[in-house]
Every structure is written in C-alpha cells, then in structure tokens.
Amino acid sequence: MTTQTITYALAGGVGVLTLNRPEVMNALNTAMRAEITAAVLAAPDQGARVLVLTGAGRGFCSGQDLADTGGGPLDLERVLREEYEPMLHAIVDCPLPVIAAVNGVAAGAGANLALACDVVIAAESASFVQAFSRIGLIPDAGGTWFLPRQVGLARAMGAMLFADRIPARQAADWGMIWEALADDAFAAHWQARAAALAAGPTAAYGHLKAALRASPANGLHDQLAVEALLQAACGRTEDFREGVAAFVEKRPARFTGR
Ligand code: LHQ
C-alpha cells in the first residue's frame, strides 16, 4: 500500500511502514502523522505480528516539517495534542512489538518517534539529535518522558540542551537504543530480528509490552498485580501450551500468535 507520505508492506507477518518523503529527510507533516497513525492502528487486524518503522532515502525522520505551517503560524499545542499524540499512543499502545529501524538521522520529533518504538535498531551511520533547542523549542513527541528513562537525567539534559548529534554507537552504549549495526549488515539484521518476533508468541509480546509500559507509574505492589493479571492472560493462550509442549518434547516451538 502506498499513500501520500508512507508505504506499508506486509510479508510473513512483518508489517513494514516506510516514511516516504525522502526529499525532506521524511519530515512529519499533517498527512504523514495521520497516515502513520492509521497504518499502525490497522496493522494487527491485517495480520501483522510485528511492525517496523523505517525511512526512505538517507534519513529516518527529520521531525516536524518546518516548511509546513498550514498557511499561517502553527498552533503548536493543537498540532501536538491532535496530531502527534494519537500517533505516539498508537505505537505505544499497539499490541504488536514495534521496531524502529533507523537508517539515517533521526532529528527532533523524528528522534522521539524512534524512541517511542519498543526496540530501536540503527545503522552505524545513523544519529539522534534532540534538535529542538536549535529553533527555540523544548523537546516534544514524548522526548522528555522517554529519554531520561532510557539514559538518565544527566545524559538527557546534555543531549537536549546542546542538541548534539549522538551517533548510533554512542546511543547504543548509553542504552538509548537496543543496537547499532554496521551499515552493510543493518538491513539484513533488522529483517531477521523482525522475522524472529513475527514467529514468536504475539499475545505474550503484547502483554510484556503493556507490563513494561505500566511499570514507571507503579510501585512494586501494583506492578506485581499487573504481572499476575497479564500472566494469567498469557496462560490462556495456545502459544503458552505450545511453548511448554515444545520444551517437554525438546523441539522448537511453533507459535501461531493465538
Ligand atoms: C527539512 C527538515 C524539516 C523541512 C530537513 N522540515 N525540511 C512539533 C510540533 C509543531 C511544531 C514544531 O516542532 C515540533 C517538533 C519538532 O520536530 S521540532 C524539530 C524539527 N526538526 C529539526 O529542527 C531538524 C531540522 N533538520 C536538520 O537539522 C537537518 O536537516 C538534519 C540534521 C535532519 C539533516 O541534516 P543534513 O543531512 O545536512 O541534510 P539537510 O539539512 O541538507 O536536509 C536535506 C533536505 O531536507 C533539505 O532540503 P533541500 O531542499 O535544501 O535539499 C532540508 O531543508 C530538508 N529538511 N529537515 N524538519
């Protein structure tokens, strides 16, 4: 499927959503935000078992399209609340694992779009820039929530005040992202990672994600209750029965996602 600003392809349970405005490093405009949101919301019912976000061309995403002012001064609060928030919620609340395959620079809201995904795999030549202060803004699109949790306050503060380009290797060393790969190994690697998740226990992944997403707001007492509830749901899946049977029979599990 190709819309105005993205492409979406589903194969082998892997849904690949490609931001497709390479001439502006895949800057986010109103149409792209709406199309990303719609594609992410539709993916589970269309048969995807994992979702990958990546970018066309040499960039991942350069954040807000700074040329897209809608004909007048942008109402930043409205754009964030009505256009960015649904997109971020769609990703964070998606019952599927969402991989950001960061092929190039991720700047501003583009960096934070990547950080909203469950796993970030980046090419070594990619980088992350909290570019906002360069244009007199504060980080948005969830950056002030995600980044300090991932790398700690000192690194988040430095990255956001100085707006330095953080190379993918450093981002991986900091724990901002999951892994950085040599450019020539990057595509095959994220495809293999996505295929592995697509063959996994889909419902358990969704519950795992929900448990981790609930964790920052909970004390241990409440989090133990969340785990018990979600584990009970896992216990009712065919994949749990299959996982145990495969272990007992000493063979690889054949998960179906049910
Ligand atoms: C772009 C952009 C771009 C338009 C590159 N827009 N054209 C939320 C709510 C509402 C409003 C405000 O903001 C937000 C959140 C935000 O995201 S604010 C932060 C917005 N993003 C930025 O400030 C990053 C701006 N871009 C850059 O710093 C650089 O372009 C990066 C570091 C992404 C890439 O640098 P280079 O590799 O040197 O490429 P380039 O700068 O030459 O860009 C290539 C083309 O893409 C160029 O167009 P041209 O016609 O000259 O070839 C750029 O103008 C265009 N482009 N980012 N965000």
Image (spheres, rainbow, N blue to C red):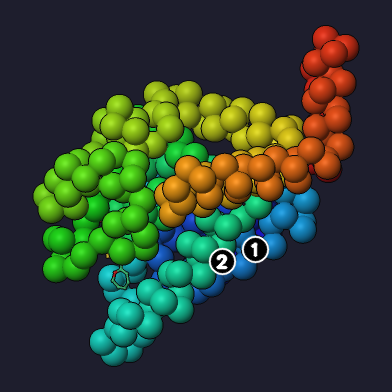
| Picture quadrant of residue 244 | top right
Inspect the image, locate mark 2, and give the three-letter code of the amino acid beneath it. Answer: Thr
- Give the percent coordinates (x, y) of residue 237: 83, 40
**Mark count:** 2
**Left or right: residue 205 compared with residue 32:** right
Identify the residue position indicated by label 2 in the image.
37
Inspect the image, locate mark 1, and give the three-letter code of the amino acid beneath it. Answer: Leu
Identify the residue position indicated by label 1 in the image.
41
State if disc 2 and disc 1 touch (CB < 8 Å).
yes
Give the residue displayed 72% in from the left and 48% down from the top: 48
Q: Which of 227 and 201 is in front in this view?
A: 227
Which corner quadrant of the figure contains ligand 1? bottom left
**Left or right: residue 17 compared with residue 80:** right
Look at the picture and state if 40 lies above or below 245.
below
- Give the percent coordinates (x, y) of residue 191: 60, 33
**Left or right: residue 75 compared with residue 194:** left
Q: Is mark 2 on a helix, strand or loop?
A: helix
| Disc 2 crowd, CA 10 A, few/some/many (<14, 14-19, 20+) | many
Q: Distance between the residues labelled 1 and 2?
A: 6 Å
